[in-house]
Image: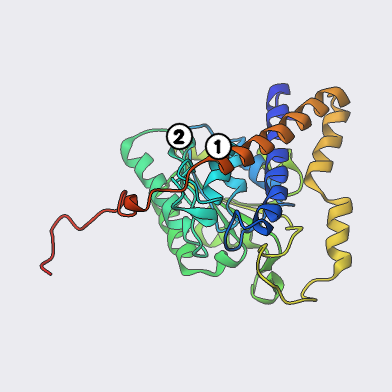
Amino acid sequence: MTLQVDQRREAYRRMLSIRRFEEALPKRIAAGEILGSVHSSIGQEAALVGACMALRDDDYITGTHRSHGHPIAKGAKLAPLMAELMGRATGICKGRGGSMHLADASVGIIGESAIVGGGIPLATGAGLSAHVRGTDQVSLGFFGDGAANQGAFHECINMAAAWKLPVIFFCENNLYAVTTPARTTHGQPDVAKRAAGYAIPGVIVDGQELEAVYEATRTAVERARRGEGPSLIEAKTYRFDEHAIGIVMPLHYRAAEEVECYRRERDPLLLYRARLLEAGHGEAELGEIESTVERMVGEAVEFARKSPHPDPSSVYDYLYSNPIGYPA
C-alpha cells in the first residue's frame, strides 16, 4: 500500500462519510426536508477520495451534478453540506446552492454545476490562474463519461496542453449517461485515449481501487507542479443507485444482475476495508472510524434540522450587478 497509516485512516473515513451521507438522503427526501432530486455517488467513492487524497488543501477542484461526494472527498464538513441540501441558512452556500451547486473555498472547491461538463472550463481557468500567479497549485476537474463528448472538454484540454497548464482532467466513467450506455455514444469508449490527440498523458485506472486512483492522480499532480502540463485520467467506476433519487427512471436500461455483481464484488468500501485489514489495521480501529462517521452524519442531520431557513429579505444578497449600469 502506498498511503501512509494516517492517510489510510483518513481515506477510509472520507469514503465511509460519502456512503453514509448519501444513504441518509432518501429519508430526508421522503420527509420533505430536501426538495427536488439528488444524485448519489454511492459506488464511486474510491475514485473521488483517491483523487482528492493526492491534492493539497489549497489545490482546486470542480465537481459535477453528482456533487455531494466531491466536497466530502476534499475534506469539507458534513453539517454545512447537509444544511445546504435542506435549504438552510447555515448551509455551505447559505441555502442558495442546493444539491448541485456546491462550493467551499476553504477546501478549494470552486464550484459544481448541473450543466454537463460545466466544471471543466472552471477547472481550466483555475489552472490558468495558478500559472499566471506563479504558484505551484494544481486544479482537478471531475466530469463524467457524457461530458467527454462536450465541446468544452476538447477546447479546454487543448488550451491546457498548449499552454502547459497545471490541470488534471478526471473522468468518472460510470458507464452510463443517465440511462444511455457509454458504449453507444463514444466512437472510442476509452476516454483516456483521447489524450493522444493533445500529446498529454492519458491513464485508465480501476476506479473501485482507492490506492490505484491515488497513485495515478499523484503522478499527474507531480507532473503538473513541475510545469509539465495537464493529464487526463479515466477512472472506470460504477454508480450503484439510479441516476437520481426523487426522479422516476426508465426500467431495464441495465441488468439487475450487473448492478448486483458490482455491489457484491466491486464495492469500493468493502474492497478498501479488506486491504486495510490485510495491511494490519484491526477490526477495532476500523470499527471506531465507522462509529464516528455514523455519529457525524446523524449530527449533520440534526444540525440542519435546527438551522433556520434563509430570511426572505436576503434574497438579493450575494448577487452582483453590472458595474457599468446599463440604462433601464
Q: Position of residue 57 (x, y in %)?
A: 50, 32
Question: How many C-alpha atoms fall within 10 Å of the one at disc 2: few (<14), some, or many (≥20)?
Answer: few
What amino acid does circle 2 point to?
A: Ser
* Residue 131 % position (x, y): 36, 41
Residue depicted at x 40% and y 57%: 159
Give the answer, above or below, for where 38 lies relative to 167: below
Q: How was the colour assigned to the protein in this rendering?
A: rainbow
Specify whether 73 is left or right of 101.
Answer: right
Residue that badge 2 annotates: 106
The residue lying toward the viewer, choosing from 36 and 11, is 36
Q: Which quadrant holds residue 8?
A: top right
Residue 242 placement: quadrant: bottom right
Query: Looking at the image, is mark 1 or mark 2 earlier in the sequence?
Result: 1
Residue at image position (46%, 46%) is 103
Q: How many marks?
A: 2
Q: Which amino acid does label 1 sit on?
A: Ala
CA gap, disc 1 and disc 2 = 8 Å
Residue 76 image label: 1
In the rendered structure, are the residues bearing label 1 and label 2 in contact, judged by CB atoms less than 8 Å apart?
yes
Left or right of 65? Residue 122 is left
Picture quarter containing residue 295? Answer: top right
Q: In this view, does 236 lie to the left or right of 71?
A: right
